[in-house]
Image: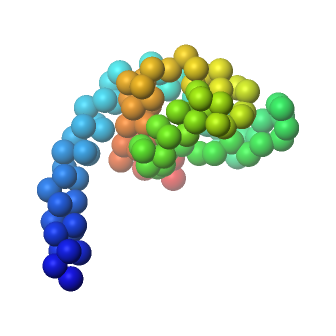
Amino acid sequence: MKRLSAIALGLAVLTPGLVQAAEANLAPAKDKVSMCIGCHGIPGYKTAFPVTYNVPKLGGQHAAYIVKALQAYKSGDRKHPSMRAIAASLSEKDMADVAAYYSAPAVQAAAK
């Protein structure tokens, strides 16, 4: 029980800093997400290349998930050709900025 309390306390101390860091990166991400909106900003959108694929909604996703997904596209671990090309053009900072943008509370609320 003490261990669980220590973990909860640690999360409570770190969370405000993480939220502030994510919000701080929204401005630089606005130009970077323009390439995402064309597919991920259309509710219920499906691609037809290379196969029919339901495009996931990004608003409300966890930042760490978005970064890991972009890294996997860039490395080739994920195979969608359009996403591989986009991720290849992104730096680690770009990925973090895009992830911060889509995980921000205001973007999450708009995505619902």
Q: Is residue 56 visible?
A: yes
Along the line of sight, the residue nearer the viewer: 75 or 62: 75
Locate residue 71 relative to residue 8 in the image: left or right: right
Q: Residue at x 82, y 31 (%)?
A: 49
Q: Residue at x 77, y 43 (%)?
A: 53
Along the line of sight, the residue nearer the viewer: 88 or 47: 88
Locate residue 38 relative to residue 107 in the image: left or right: right
Locate residue 55 relative to residue 102 in the image: left or right: right
Task: Write down the quadrant of residue 81 in the picture.
Answer: top right
Locate residue 36 relative to residue 82 in the image: left or right: left
Q: Residue 41 placed where, x, y %?
A: 59, 36
Along the line of sight, the residue nearer the viewer: 39 or 17: 17
Q: Residue at x 48, y 46 (%)?
A: 65
Q: Residue 62 placed where, x, y %?
A: 44, 49
Q: Residue 3 placed where, x, y %?
A: 20, 74
Q: Residue 97 placed where, x, y %?
A: 38, 29
Q: Is residue 5 above or below residue 102?
A: below
Q: Residue at x 70, y 26 (%)?
A: 82
